[in-house]
Each structure stands twice: as C-alpha cells, then as structure tokens.
Image (tube, rainbow, N blue to C red):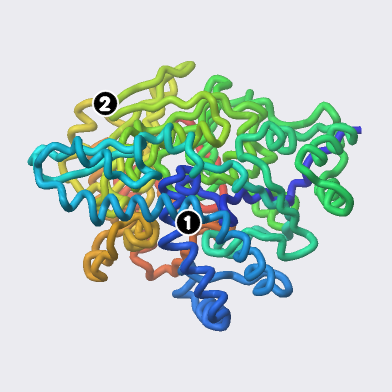
Amino acid sequence: MTLSLKRNVIAEPAVAGWYAWSYLLPPQTLAKYLKNHYRSIVESYLEDPGAHRTALKQARFQGGPFVHEQGEDAYGKIEHWYQDAREQYAPLLELADAIDELEQEILPGLTGATTEAVYRKLPEPLAGRVELFYGRDNRTPDYRFIEPLLYASRHFTPGLQQVRFSRVTEDARSFALTTPVLEYTPEQLLVTVPLDSPLLDAVFRGGLTPEELDRIGADLGLTGERAQTFRSFFEEDPDPSGSRPDGSGEDVIEYLGHACVFVRHRGTTFLVDPVVSYSGYEHRSDGRFTFDDLPERIDYVMITHNHQDHMLLETLLKIRHRVGRVVIAKSANSSLVDPDLKRILGVLGFPDVVELDDLDSLDTPGGAITALPFLGEHGDIRIRTKCGWLLDLDGTRVLFAADSTNVSPHLYAQVAAAVGPVDTVFIGMESVGAPVSWLYGPLFPERLERRVDAGRRLKGSNFEQAAAIVDTLQARSVYVYAMGQEPWLGAVMCIEYDESHPAMVDSDKLVGYVRERGGTSKRLFLHESIAVRP
C-alpha cells in the first residue's frame, strides 16, 4: 500500500504569516511590505473588524486591504498571532527603516560629489549590502542591493516560511493576499518548513508507504493529533505504479486557465506561467485540466513576468519535483521593485534556472524558446524581469505575449523584422487593470498622487493595440487569455467582468476582427485543446 495527498487538499505557502508570493522572499521587499502594507492591514482589522466585514460585502472592495475572516474566533486567533509576529518582524522592520533612511535622508544629500564617505554612514542593515551610484546626469543618485549578502544576513529567515494544508470542496477561494495564514479551523494544518525543503517534494510526489509518511510527519514536527490530521490528508493509491501521463502522445497545446498553457511537442513538455487547478471535487465535470493531467515530467517551465498570477508559488511548489528547467527573463536590477527572480527561484528550490535577454534563444528538441520584448503592464516603473515567449515547434511558431501592452507602435514591427511572422498568438487583454500602487505601492518612498496612480495601470492591450500586434506578426490564430476569470484565480485576483466591461468589449472586437479576416480566434476560459499547427 502507498499513500498520496488527496486531490482536493490545497497547500498554501506562507512567509511571515502571509500568503506567499515572490516579493515576500527577498528580505528587502518582504521588509517593505511588512512595514508599509501588512502591518497596517492587521492593525486596522484589530482596531475595527466591523469595518473590514462591511467593506467585504461590497464587490468593489474585493482585493482591497481587508481581512477575510475564516472559522470561529478569527479575531482572537489573529490578535494572539500578531502579538508574537511583531517580535518576529523586528529585524525586518529595522531593514525597512534603513531603506527609508537611505532613500529619504542619505540619497537626497548626494548632488554629484563622490560617495566614498557615505558608505561609512549607512545604517547597519545596509552596510556592505548596497552599492551607490549616480545616473548619467551625474546628479541623480541611486543604489542597488547586493542581494546574496542580504540573503546571508539575519534579515532572511527560513523559519518564517510555512505551508498550510487544508481540504476544500470548491475552488472559489477568498482573496488570500490580505489575510494572515493561520489555523482557523480543525481542518487546517499549518507547518513551519523552509519552502525549498525536500520534504515538500516527497509530500507532493506521493507514493509513500505508511512508514515513510509517518517519518515525514515527524520531520515536520507533527505529533499527536496534529500528526493524525496530517495523515488524514492522504489516501491510498489505487495503483501503486501510478497512472499519471508520461508526457508522450500527440503534439498539443492545452490551455489550463488564465495565462497557463501546457505544450507537448515530440515528447518534450512545456508549461507557461503555471497556475493550475486542483481537482477531487464537483467541478471536475467542467472538463478543466488539473494537476492530475500534468505529466510526470515537465521539461521547461517558462515564466513571462514576476506577478503572482503568472508565477504562483502555490502551483510551483506542488510541481517542483517534476520540473526540469525554469526559463525566465533576464533580471539584473537588484532593486526594490525588481528583485532577482533567479535567486528567488533558487530559494524556492529550483536549481536549474536559465535567464534569456531580449531576442536570446534556447534550443529545445525540435525547436527553440526565444525571449521577445515585453512593454507595459508594470505601471511605468523600471521592471526588467519580463518577456514574451516565442516557442518554435519544428517551424510552427507560437507567441505567449501575456499582458504585453503595445504602447510603442513601432516595437512589433521591429520584432517581426528580427524574428519573422508568427503562426499563433496568445495575448492578454485585461485592458483596464489596477493602479500601479495596488501591487507596488508599499515599495515606493512616498504615496503617488491619486491622479497619477489612476493613470499608471497594470494592464494588458486594448483592441487597437492587440490588433496591431496580430497584423504585424501576421498571425493566423489568435487566443485571448490571462483574463483572470477562472474560479481558482480568486486567491490572488479579484476580477469579475460583465459583457459591458471594456476588457470584454475589446477582446470580443479582437476575436471578431481576426475571424473576419479568415483566421481562428477565441477568448479562452477554463480549458481548451488546440492543435499545434493552425
């Protein structure tokens, strides 16, 4: 007899008590989010929980800085947790204060003279861990983090990393990014474990003997009733040899929801922007593609950009034991808004990560992966870690443009001149998007004016921009994706469109536009199987 995790058991990673996404792993960004975002959320809730309950009854406040209460006595549990958390936060808050001192007091005093003396005045958390420099105007000071040294400091604590296991009956979960990750009900089990731990791979791989499962529970520090609860999350495998797909079979492109696409070509497997649905509950009948349908081996995981709906840690950790290589855009800024994604993936336990700069290619069996420029979506801040992926499959060329916004009318003409036409384009058309501060606000040294914030948005292409991309690349097949409509996206996104919403209007226009010209087009939802050759 062997045992594996039940299909409807979710495993939510957490850092410092909050649902884990990639910006909570680097010490510098975690520190700023704790100081400028999470601390105010929990303190606001503890001061007036009724205000949070009232706000969450209104659809327009979903995704805002409000705590979603779970189970009985959520208030008491959060209050008790926060008393301990404030002590744990102390080193990180010192780092956040040091960053503020650097940005608001030290750098403004630099006007072009040498920075040599300034290094001796840096606050302790940053001493020896940053480089100071001027822009090309020789007046504007800036800095970068020496990130390996921050990870080696007391400000990076794997002991703040946890995973919460629980059973679910449906996947329409509450927004997770603003609620502390605690044990609110007896059906939830929170374990403290580094997110790169091989124990997690063993849990997610399954096929465990009862003795192996008991050892894993003990290694996770579980005893007594908690060990029994952990054991209850597993079930006997119907076939010890397993029945998971092996990755072989016909070439196919499978849309898995949002921006996640699985590709199989000549037995080589690719997974773009992994956000995958669980199974084991009633919605299985809707034909979705779940973790159960993924092959035992995923040769390449390709991440377009470092947002939580494209690089979902919850999915990445669950499939880590199957992944060969992760391919990302080149990330070298080491800044607050653009931390080193390769290092983040290393902290998550992915040893084989390849960075590609614009128009760089990586050969694959029967083709290649090429990084294409990605503009927009990031509110006009300096984010380098983003690209579209052009996947060549024996001459059939598929572009995953994600949320690229065609803000430069000449960019794709230059791209087409460099790489040639493309057969199939996947493009996101969330054409309104959230203000830039919704995601990056806690990292800014000061609050943006409301007018400026409203104009700088995290959005994809509208109809005119998307149509220009399609025409320039001469695509015959066009699929609108990354619209955030699948129910399992609720944990990290709060988007509900009706047919009159600009994103739906724009995407409908694009679909009609392509079809009128004899092409194939569709706005994707839940699951779609697509032939590799259009």
Q: Is residue 182 left or right of residue 86?
A: right
Residue 419, disc: 2
Looking at the picture, does residue 295 appear above or below residue 442?
above
Residue 29, disc: none
Name the amino acid, label 2.
Val
Q: Quadrant of the N terminus?
A: top right
- Mark 2 element type: helix
Name the amino acid, label 1.
Gly
Please report the residue visible at 55 percent of the width from the left and 50 percent of the height from the top.
20
Please report the residue visible at 43 percent of the width from the left and 32 percent of the height from the top.
148
Q: What residue is shown with label 1?
A: 484
Q: Position of residue 84 (x, y in %)?
A: 62, 61
Q: Position of residue 326 (x, y in %)?
A: 49, 29
* Quarter assignment of residue 400: top left
Q: Is residue 426 left or right of residue 164?
A: left
Report, in whole angstroms, how far the alpha carbon at label 1 lies from the one at label 2.
Answer: 30 Å
Q: Position of residue 505 (x, y in %)?
A: 35, 63
- Mark 1 element type: loop
